[in-house]
C-alpha cells in the first residue's frame, strides 16, 4: 500500500471521528455546538445509502431561504461529490434535524441559471465557497431541502412545541446579531438578507396563527385571559412594524431593538399562556 493511500485513509478516519463527535454534540445540545462552529447554522441530513439502503447522517451548514433551506455539496473542496449528495440523487426523500425540530423533506438539486444565481449569493455571504469552486473541475452542487410535512419537536405537548418555536426565533436572532456585529455593521451580506427574509416570514406566520387561532380559542375557554391576550396582540402589531423596517434596511441598532422587544414578548407570552396549555 502506498504512503499516499495510507495517509488518505488516516485523514479520512480522523475526519469521520471528528464528524461523529460533532453529531453527538449536536444531538446532546439541541443543535448547538461549540468551537469553530459555535455561531454556525447546522443541520443533520439523513439520507438513504445509495448502495446499502441504510440511513446515513451528515452534519452540514445551511442557509435559510424562504420556505426551504439550502446546503452546498462542497465536501471541503474535494474533487468528488460528497456521499450524501450521491444518496439523495438516488432517493430525494430525506430527514432534516435542526436541533429543536426535525421534519421530512424532499431534496431538489438546483440546476442551470437558478443554481448559478443562488451560488453567487452564497459566495457573497461566504467567499470560501468560491475558493472551493475555483479549486475543482466539478460544479459544486447546491441542494434545496423542501419540507414535506410539519416539524416534530422533542415533546408532543403543545406547551413544549411553543417553547421550541420561541427558542428557534431567539437562536436565529442571536445568529443574525452576531453576523452583523462581526461584519462591522457595514452593508448587509446575502446571507443576512436570506436570514432576515426567513425570520420575518416565520414570525409573521407564527404571530398570524396565534392571533387568528390560539388567542381566540384561549380567551373563549378562559375569559380571564382577555386583558393579557390584548397586550400580547398589541405587541404583535409593534413587532410587525419592526419586521417591515428590517426588510428594507438592517442595522445593529434595529436588530437590538427587535431582540429586546421580541424577547420581552416571548417571555410574557410564555408566562401568561403556558399554564393554560
Image (tube, grey):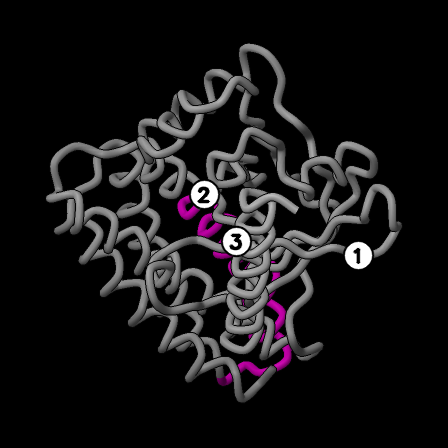
Task: Residue at 60% x, 52% y: name it.
Answer: 9
Residue 226 vs residue 5: left or right?
Answer: left
The residue carrying mark 2 is 198
Q: Position of residue 244 (x, y in %)?
A: 31, 39
Of tags 1 and 2, the one toward the viewer is 1
The residue tagged with tag 2: helix, strand or loop?
helix
Residue range highlighted in magenta: 199-224
- Give the residue at the far top of this rendering: 113
Q: Residue at x 30, y 51 (%)?
A: 176
* Nearest to viewer (mark 2 / mark 3): 3
Sequence-first disc among 2 and 3:
3
Q: Nearer the viewer, residue 249 or 28?
A: 28
Callout 3: 10 Å neighbours few (<14), some, many (20+)? few
| Classed neighbour count for the residue bearing mark 1: other residues with Cα under 10 Å, few (<14), some (14–19), many (≥20) | some
The residue at which mark 1 appears reads as 55
Relative to 268, residue 207 above or below = above
Q: Is residue 57 above or below residue 115?
A: below
Cα–Cα gap, marks 2 and 3: 37 Å
Image coordinates for residue 103, horizontal then vertical, percent: 69, 56
Task: Classify mark 2: residues with Cα within 10 Å, few (<14), some (14-19) or many (20+).
Answer: many
Which residue is the site of mark 3?
11
Proximity of marks 1 and 2: CB atoms separated by less than 8 Å: no
Amino acid at each position: 500500500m502506498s504512503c499516499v493511500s495510507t495517509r488518505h485513509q488516516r485523514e479520512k478516519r480522523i475526519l469521520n471521528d471528528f464528524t461523529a463527535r460533532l453529531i453527538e454534540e449536536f444531538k446532546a445540545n439541541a443543535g448547538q455546538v461549540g468551537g469553530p462552529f459555535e455561531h454556525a447554522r447546522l443541520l443533520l441530513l439523513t439520507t438513504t445509502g445509495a448502495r446499502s439502503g441504510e440511513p446515513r447522517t451528515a452534519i452540514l451548514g445551511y442557509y435559510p431561504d424562504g420556505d426551504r433551506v439550502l446546503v452546498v455539496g462542497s465536501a471541503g473542496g474535494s474533487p468528488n461529490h460528497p456521499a450524501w449528495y450521491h444518496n439523495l440523487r438516488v432517493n430525494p426523500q430525506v430527514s432534516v434535524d435542526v436541533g429543536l425540530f426535525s421534519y421530512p423533506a424532499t431534496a431538489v438539486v438546483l440546476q442551470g441559471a437558478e443554481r448559478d444565481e443562488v451560488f453567487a449569493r452564497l459566495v457573497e455571504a461566504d467567499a470560501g465557497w468560491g475558493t472551493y469552486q475555483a479549486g475543482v473541475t466539478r460544479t459544486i452542487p447546491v441542494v434545496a431541502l423542501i419540507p414535506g410535512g410539519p416539524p416534530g419537536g422533542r415533546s408532543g405537548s403543545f406547551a413544549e412545541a411553543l417553547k421550541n418555536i420561541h427558542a428557534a426565533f431567539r437562536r436565529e436572532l442571536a445568529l443574525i446579531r452576531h453576523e452583523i456585529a462581526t461584519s462591522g455593521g457595514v452593508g448587509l451580506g446575502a446571507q443576512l438578507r436570506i436570514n432576515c427574509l426567513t425570520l420575518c416570514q416565520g414570525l409573521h406566520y407564527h404571530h398570524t396563527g396565534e392571533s387568528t387561532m390560539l388567542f381566540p380559542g384561549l380567551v373563549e375557554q378562559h375569559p380571564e385571559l382577555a386583558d393579557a391576550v390584548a397586550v400580547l396582540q398589541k405587541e404583535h402589531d409593534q413587532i410587525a412594524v419592526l419586521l417591515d423596517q428590517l426588510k428594507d434596511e438592517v442595522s445593529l441598532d434595529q436588530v437590538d431593538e427587535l431582540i429586546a422587544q421580541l424577547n420581552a414578548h416571548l417571555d410574557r407570552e410564555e408566562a401568561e399562556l403556558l399554564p393554560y396549555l
